[in-house]
Amino acid sequence: MSAHTVLTLIFAGKTDVLIPLDHAQRFHAALQNSGVATELVIHNGGHGFDDAKSLQTFITRTTAFLKTHLRRQQSDTRTMFRFCSGYASSGAHQVEPSSSD
Protein backbone atom coordinates (compact mmCIF):
# COMPACT_ATOMS: atom_id res chain seq x y z
CA MET A 1 0.00 0.00 0.00
CA SER A 2 1.03 3.56 -0.65
CA ALA A 3 -0.53 6.99 -0.93
CA HIS A 4 -1.24 6.00 -4.56
CA THR A 5 -3.59 3.23 -3.46
CA VAL A 6 -7.14 4.10 -4.45
CA LEU A 7 -9.77 5.45 -2.07
CA THR A 8 -11.22 2.70 0.02
CA LEU A 9 -14.60 2.53 1.73
CA ILE A 10 -14.89 -0.45 4.06
CA PHE A 11 -18.13 -1.83 5.45
CA ALA A 12 -17.90 -4.42 8.21
CA GLY A 13 -20.47 -6.23 10.30
CA LYS A 14 -20.02 -6.56 14.05
CA THR A 15 -21.23 -10.16 13.96
CA ASP A 16 -19.62 -11.24 10.67
CA VAL A 17 -18.37 -14.83 11.01
CA LEU A 18 -16.79 -14.95 7.52
CA ILE A 19 -14.58 -11.86 7.82
CA PRO A 20 -13.89 -10.91 11.43
CA LEU A 21 -14.31 -7.25 12.34
CA ASP A 22 -10.68 -6.94 13.39
CA HIS A 23 -9.60 -7.71 9.79
CA ALA A 24 -11.49 -4.66 8.55
CA GLN A 25 -10.12 -2.56 11.40
CA ARG A 26 -6.51 -3.61 10.69
CA PHE A 27 -6.96 -3.04 6.95
CA HIS A 28 -8.40 0.42 7.64
CA ALA A 29 -5.49 1.28 9.98
CA ALA A 30 -2.93 0.12 7.39
CA LEU A 31 -4.57 2.30 4.73
CA GLN A 32 -4.55 5.30 7.07
CA ASN A 33 -0.90 4.73 7.93
CA SER A 34 -0.12 4.71 4.20
CA GLY A 35 -1.89 8.01 3.62
CA VAL A 36 -4.83 6.51 1.73
CA ALA A 37 -8.23 8.20 1.89
CA THR A 38 -10.31 5.59 3.68
CA GLU A 39 -13.40 5.23 5.81
CA LEU A 40 -14.58 2.31 7.93
CA VAL A 41 -18.30 1.86 8.55
CA ILE A 42 -19.30 -0.76 11.10
CA HIS A 43 -22.88 -1.98 11.04
CA ASN A 44 -24.69 -4.17 13.56
CA GLY A 45 -25.27 -7.09 11.19
CA GLY A 46 -23.18 -9.94 9.93
CA HIS A 47 -21.70 -10.58 6.49
CA GLY A 48 -23.74 -8.33 4.25
CA PHE A 49 -26.75 -6.12 4.73
CA ASP A 50 -29.57 -8.30 5.94
CA ASP A 51 -31.97 -5.61 7.09
CA ALA A 52 -33.36 -2.35 5.75
CA LYS A 53 -31.51 -0.18 8.28
CA SER A 54 -28.09 -1.64 7.36
CA LEU A 55 -28.83 -1.26 3.67
CA GLN A 56 -29.92 2.36 4.16
CA THR A 57 -26.72 3.05 6.10
CA PHE A 58 -24.73 1.53 3.23
CA ILE A 59 -26.46 3.74 0.67
CA THR A 60 -26.20 6.91 2.77
CA ARG A 61 -22.54 6.46 3.73
CA THR A 62 -21.51 5.40 0.22
CA THR A 63 -23.20 8.45 -1.29
CA ALA A 64 -21.49 10.78 1.19
CA PHE A 65 -18.10 9.13 0.63
CA LEU A 66 -18.40 9.42 -3.15
CA LYS A 67 -19.55 13.05 -3.01
CA THR A 68 -16.68 13.99 -0.74
CA HIS A 69 -13.95 12.23 -2.67
CA LEU A 70 -15.22 12.76 -6.21
CA ARG A 71 -15.15 16.50 -5.61
CA ARG A 72 -11.54 16.25 -4.44
CA GLN A 73 -10.40 14.00 -7.27
CA GLN A 74 -12.50 14.96 -10.28
CA SER A 75 -9.46 15.03 -12.55
CA ASP A 76 -8.01 11.75 -11.30
CA THR A 77 -9.16 9.16 -13.82
CA ARG A 78 -7.47 6.39 -11.81
CA THR A 79 -9.92 6.78 -8.93
CA MET A 80 -11.74 3.57 -8.13
CA PHE A 81 -13.74 2.54 -5.13
CA ARG A 82 -13.64 -0.71 -3.27
CA PHE A 83 -16.45 -1.83 -1.14
CA CYS A 84 -15.22 -4.45 1.27
CA SER A 85 -18.35 -6.14 2.33
CA GLY A 86 -20.20 -9.36 1.98
CA TYR A 87 -22.91 -7.77 -0.13
CA ALA A 88 -26.05 -9.37 1.17
CA SER A 89 -28.32 -11.48 -0.89
CA SER A 90 -28.89 -8.59 -3.28
CA GLY A 91 -26.85 -10.46 -5.87
CA ALA A 92 -23.96 -7.97 -5.83
CA HIS A 93 -20.47 -9.41 -6.03
CA GLN A 94 -17.66 -8.94 -3.55
CA VAL A 95 -14.70 -7.02 -4.94
CA GLU A 96 -11.32 -8.49 -4.09
CA PRO A 97 -8.23 -6.30 -3.69
CA SER A 98 -5.84 -6.61 -6.59
CA SER A 99 -2.43 -8.17 -6.05
CA SER A 100 -0.73 -4.95 -7.22
CA ASP A 101 -1.80 -2.98 -4.11
Image (cartoon, helix red, strand yellow):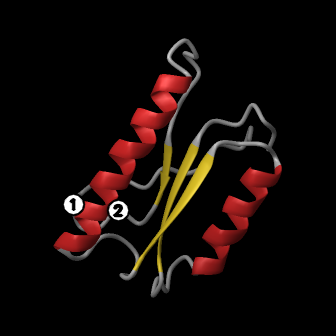
Task: Calculate the distance from the C-alpha at mark 1 to the C-alpha at mark 2.
Answer: 7 Å
Quarter-wise, where is residue 49 in the image? bottom left
Residue toward you, 23 or 63: 63
Find the residue positioned furthest to the top.
75
Q: Residues within 10 Å of mark 1 (few under 14, many from 20)?
A: few
Q: Which mark is residue 90?
A: 1
* Three-letter amino acid code of the residue under disc 2: Tyr
Q: Tell me residue 8's x, y (percent).
A: 58, 46
Q: Examine the rendering and report whether any part of residue 1 can be seen.
A: yes
Report whether 4 appears left or right of 43. right
Q: Tell me residue 62's x, y (percent).
A: 38, 48
Q: Examine the rendering and report whether any part of residue 92 can be seen.
A: no
Disc 1 element: loop
Residue on which the image places disc 2: 87
**Total tally of numbered discs in the picture:** 2
* Three-letter amino acid code of the residue under disc 1: Ser
Quarter-wise, where is residue 19 in the image? bottom right
**Looking at the picture, does residue 14 appear above or below residue 96?**
below
Q: Residue at x 23, y 67 (%)?
A: 89
Q: Residue at x 25, y 64 (%)?
A: 55
Disc 2 element: loop
Q: Residue at x 40, y 34 (%)?
A: 67
Q: Residue at x 59, y 39 (%)?
A: 7
**Looking at the picture, does residue 41 appear above or below residue 43?**
above
Residue toward you, 48 or 42: 42
Q: Are marks 1 and 2 in contact (CB under 8 Å)?
A: yes
